[in-house]
Amino acid sequence: MPFTVCTWNINSVRLREPIVLKLLEEEAPDVLCLQECKSPVEKIPTAGFHALGYTHMVARGQKGYNGVAILSRIPMVEAGAEDFAQLGHARHIAGKLENGVTIHNHYVPAGGDVADRTVNEKFGQKLDYLTDMRDAYRANAPQKSILVGDLNIAPREDDVWSHKQLLKVVSHTPIEVEHLSETMEAGKWVDVTRQDIPEGQLYSWWSYRARDWDAADKGRRLDHVWATPDISSAAHGSRVLRDARGWEKPSDHAPVFATFDL
């Protein structure tokens, strides 16, 4: 049976509960993976999700920061949570669906403003997180798995509005792209979004700082959907719901979707 997965950095699930419900009502993905929930698990507003049929949830949370959750209409059980780079942050949760597919939901550290770990601890934490991800997938090769999340890196030249101008800007620097590529290669992950949309500019994030984000269109593709080779060929229908960036009290990220015929 086909199922659709959506990933979305919501930037506070409690503050933006109305637009989460809007997405679930209008788009009805079978699985919704949220990042930057900024809430302890027990305070995630699940009643509205349950009313729409999303009765399964696995999550890791913390007050005011980070936080990841997977909501599902398909029966799902928790399949682990890792503290990559030993940061003590709620940045990863995995859930296993009844069809045997494991979904890994990641919120990779943003990395601060300076792309130099000698002067910016946050940038070092980001690189260490990616290194730990790489090593984990090398040690235990994933199978029948999907990896989604705000990975906070736009790897391709056409994943940013200006490759040349962003080469020294955190999220598109060569060292970050290299670390992400190594992580992808370690798990033999396939970039499902770019498998479906191989050419052209594609963004999932637009800064709050832009007066008119839509007209300026200075975006980056920071949010990703990957799959292991054993199921990547079953993926199709990838899209970014750009309109959600313009909803009332929006996140600065837009939801990213993919459907799997499994």
Image (cartoon, grey):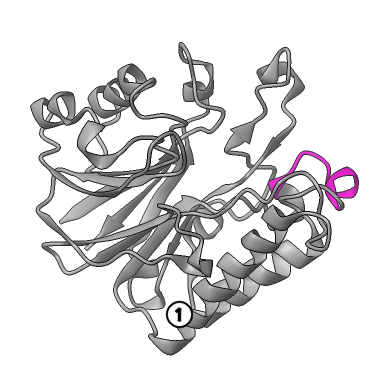
Please report the residue visible at 9 percent of the width from the left and 53 percent of the height from the top.
75
Q: Between residue 13 and residue 2, name the one nearer to us.
A: 13
Q: Is residue 200 left or right of residue 189?
A: right
Please report the residue visible at 68 percent of the width from the left and 53 percent of the height from the top.
122
Q: Where is residue 139 in the image (x, y as percent from the top left)?
A: 43, 88
Q: Is residue 71 left or right of residue 225?
A: left
Q: Position of residue 126 (x, y in %)?
A: 63, 60
Please report the residue visible at 72 percent of the width from the left and 17 percent of the height from the top.
215
Q: How crowded is mark 1: few (under 14 residues within 10 Å), some or many (20 or more)?
A: some
User: Where the N terminus falls, by quadrant?
Assistant: bottom left
Q: Is residue 173 left or right of residue 124?
A: right
Q: Give the range drawn in magenta.
A: 159-167
Q: Between residue 244 and residue 111, name the one nearer to us.
A: 111
Q: Is residue 229 left or right of residue 178?
A: left
| Residue located beneath label 1 in the image | 136
**Residue 233 in view here:** no
Q: Is residue 101 above or below residue 48?
A: below
The image quarter containing residue 42 is top left
The image quarter containing residue 61 is top left
Q: Position of residue 24 (x, y in %)?
A: 26, 29
Q: How many marks?
A: 1
Question: Secondary structure beneath disc 1?
Answer: helix
**Residue 63 in view here:** yes
The image quarter containing residue 19 is top left
Please report the residue visible at 90 percent of the width from the left and 48 percent of the height from the top.
164
Q: Position of residue 84 (x, y in %)?
A: 48, 67
